[in-house]
Image (cartoon, grey):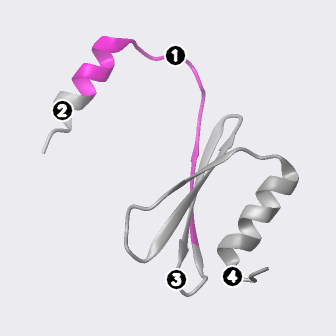
Amino acid sequence: MTDHSLYVLLRKLEDAKIPFTLARDRPDTIRVTMHLVGERTEIDVFDDGHMEVSRFCGAEDIVGDEALVDRLIQENRD
């Protein structure tokens, strides 16, 4: 079993039964997104094992519908 910080983190999340997803947006990191009530936490784990954490807290109110999705896509097109 490896001691790389990514695997240590995944074992901790699994042991705590905290849901998460993995993504690879950059060649030198794997992003682990923890899904908590009222918060999303993104943890970028780098090749060398260090981590950078971003927290997004707030209400989980419904703020729109399909029209809002369409507007957001239009406003953020490349």
Q: Which mark is residue 62?
A: 1
Crowding near the residue tagged with mark 4, few <14, some 14–19, many ≥20 C-alpha atoms within 10 Å: few
Circle 1 — which element? loop
Crowding near the residue tagged with mark 2, few <14, some 14–19, many ≥20 C-alpha atoms within 10 Å: few
Spatial CA distance of label 3 from label 2 is: 34 Å
Amino acid of disc 2: Glu
Amino acid of disc 3: Asp
Vertical comparison of 42 with 1: above or below: above
The magenta stretch spans which residues? Answer: 52-72
What residue is shown with label 2?
A: 75
- The N terminus is located in which quarter? bottom right
Amino acid of disc 1: Ile
- Image quarter for residue 59? top right
Q: In the rendering, at what x and y percent does residue 13 appear?
A: 77, 56
Spatial CA distance of label 1 from label 2 is: 20 Å
- Left or right of 66 on screen, residue 23: right
What residue is shown with label 4?
A: 4
